[in-house]
Image (spheres, helix red, strand yellow):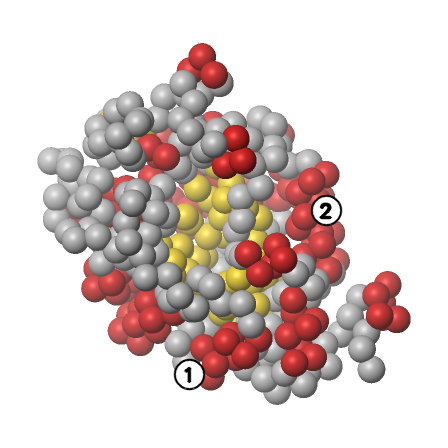
Amino acid sequence: MSALFTPYKIKETEFKNRLVVSPMCMYSSEDGFANNWHMVHLGSRAVGGAGLLFTEAIAVSPEGRITPCDLGIWKDEHIVKLKEIVEFATSQGVIMGTQLAHAGRKASTSQPWKGGKLLDVNAGGWETFAPSPVPFNDENPLPKTLDPAGLKKVIKDFKAAAARARKAGFKVVEIHAAHGYLLHQFLSPLSNFRKDGYGGDFNNRIRLLLEVVEAVKEEWPENLPLFVRISATDWAKGGWNAEESVELAKLLKEKGVDLIDCSSGGLIPKVKIPVSKAYQVPFAEKIKAEAAIATGAVGLITTAEEAEEILNKKQADLIFMAREFLREPYFPFKAAQLLGEDLSWPPQYERAKPN
């Protein structure tokens, strides 16, 4: 059997293969509610044969949204439609996960196809929050520094979101600490200039993330997988780096995290990133080897052969794909054919299966 289509088990949860539909923002919600767009978008990929399917990043609070149209999980009413989506996905044999997120200083923007610019309060925007009064770019106003009460609220919001995710039936939760969003902002010395216990040295900068993990675990069942997505490097001098990522991964493993989803960048604009095929895979390989924790590889992995090679070289344990699943919701079926695997198709589609 190919490595890509070998089942993978974390605790009591078994994924039928190593392909993961990575979280991809759709910016198509109203007041955080999932709707029929999400059902069709996620449902298509649930039918498509992946082992694990994530929703997009799901905001733990209204102020934690990237845009006014982000998916949310900050109130109980959000659970109903999410549960419906999870139940359908589960019926198709895929494990369903969700990614809990807070955008921090990168919040309150318009949708990308509307420019992705900061929205002021008069245009439907809101006040943004960050570890320090440092904006994402020169065009943005200063974010409000999170005070002790604000920090407690962030932790409480992640905890409550995990409880709602459990009630909705998700089997995997991932905490988003990458791409320049709030938890990443605390990790990096390029955005965190605090002088209290949440800033300064490495142990202080990682404190909020560790506290969020602890809070989430109070609500998330011990037998279900818990992932954390990180940006393994800021790609900038003086920023968060791969060596710190390894040390963080060791501590996250001690806290009960099962897998590190290894991305990079997003903290500051206009950074030169050496983008190329599978360019982030070395981070997953390094963290897997040096922190002795399972990792997910992500970033311009677009073919079955690339995914198979990554797994055979023990560079990662799961393959996360985003844009490729936008282009081809049924990528696993084509990948299986290329790798000589006889993947089971939905009976409704069986007549289209190649001989």
Image check: 70 left or right of 296?
right
Q: Residue furthest right?
A: 351
| Residue 235 x %, y % | 26, 55
Going by the numbered disc 1, the residue's amino acid type is: Lys
Rendered residue at 72%/76% (across/down) = 343
Q: CA distance from mark 1 to mark 2?
A: 35 Å
Q: Which residue is mark 2?
A: 40
Q: Quadrant of residue 150?
A: top left
Mark found first going from the N terminus, 1 or 2: 2
Nearest to the observer: residue 135 or residue 217 = 135
Going by the numbered disc 2, the residue's amino acid type is: Val
Q: Does residue 97 appear in the picture of this structure?
A: no
Q: Residues within 10 Å of mark 1 (few under 14, many from 20)?
A: few
What element does badge 2 sit on? helix
Name the disc covering residue 313, or none: 1
Rendered position, 321 above or below 291? above
| Residue 209 x %, y % | 31, 47
Image check: 92 left or right of 116?
right
Q: Quadrant of residue 8?
A: bottom right
